[in-house]
Amino acid sequence: MLVLIVAGGFALFKQEREDEAIKIGVIIPLTGSLAKVGEDVRAALQIAEALLDSQDAIELIFEDDAFLPEKSVSAFQKLTSVDGVDAVIGPLNGSAIEAVRPLALEKKIVAFTPWGAGNRIGGYTIKNSVEADEEAHAIAELATSQFQLKRLAILYLKNEWGLTHARAFETALKTENVELIASEPFDFGTTDYRTQLTKIKAARPDGLFIVNNGAAVGIVAKQARQLGIAAQLFGQYATESSDLIASGGMDLEGLIYSFPIDESNLSDTQKQFVADFEAKAGGKPQVAAYNAYDIYAILRSVFKKCGRNNSLCVRDYILGLKEYVGLGGIISFAEQKLHREFHFKTIREGQFMPLAE
């Protein structure tokens, strides 16, 4: 009788657990220098929640990590141990992703980030972003083939994301028989880049690849032009942000950067998302916002198939996606890598424009 009572009680507990709302933790910067990126991700997730979650019970629990790895770890521990989340979206910081990686593996909780281009996919850590090495190769090919540049330099954030770009950029240039004449790293939180830029100027580059985020790219551009660096400026997918133009002004004119979405040929669904996002956030969605929306949609489908308490199914379902048509582009995982197309945009008269126009 006791065995039956215990077994029955366990079955009842399990059923109650299954009937609870699916809890998804979100670790993003809502304070600090990259708060705008975090706010964009939150807005995109709330739009997805409103559009897709009319009948499903999904609860989003937001935690602010200020883009700091130690706070990301604390947030992950709180979300998994106290809140009992079924999956985590984020964090965004490449170093934070690596700090959370062993915890995700230990707890068997998928950590699915909309950034992390320089981070590998493995264990329970997954990204919906781009591969930094593929992106760097695309930018190097554009600079050398289309613009016929011969003397390239790179200024990059000194973390896994920036280092991956720097290594891949140098490798790509070698295949084009073009020299990387200067490679200068900087620490997170840097606002004065003139020491690195002075060294770059001395090398006389005709192209400069800036691996930094949003408004910080504008600061680099302004300081570079003030120092007399006339090189063609290049950026990557995290360049475009609503606060970029305000930080760099006319010094950003002509900057070219990669973007995984073909905004010259948006679908009706993408156009609706853009309209909803502009109404909610007051600006155009950037890459992280598109990616976050897709992560929500994917996780919603995953839990419909796998249910709760089946983390291996959740992970393998995501990594098995092929030709998934998301708002942020076509998503295909293969051999622990995420392959995306690249398009290019530029800044003309203070506006973000497709390069081809």
Image (cartoon, rainbow, N blue to C red):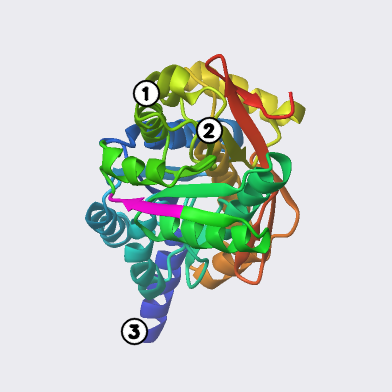
Q: How many marks?
A: 3
Mark found first going from the N terminus, 2 or 1 = 1
Q: Amino acid at mark 1?
A: Ser
Q: Which residue is mark 1?
A: 247
Find residue 29 and report its horizontal and vertical position in percent: 32, 41
Mark found first going from the N terminus, 3 or 2 = 3
Mark found first going from the N terminus, 3 or 1 = 3
Q: Which residue is mark 2?
A: 286
Q: Which residue is mark 3?
A: 2
The residue sitting at 40% across, 40% down in the picture is 201
Task: Decide if residue 118 is in sight here.
Answer: no
| Drawn side of residue 240 relative to residue 9, left or right | right
Range of residues picked out in magenta: 182-187
* Label 1: how many Cα within 10 Å (few below 14, some 14–19, many 20+): some
Q: Amino acid at mark 2?
A: Gln
Task: Compute the Cα span from label 3 to label 1.
Answer: 69 Å
| Drawn side of residue 355 relative to residue 53, left or right | right
* Quadrant of the snapshot with the C terminus: top right
The answer to whether mark 3 and mark 2 are in CB contact below 8 A is: no
Mark 3: secondary structure: helix
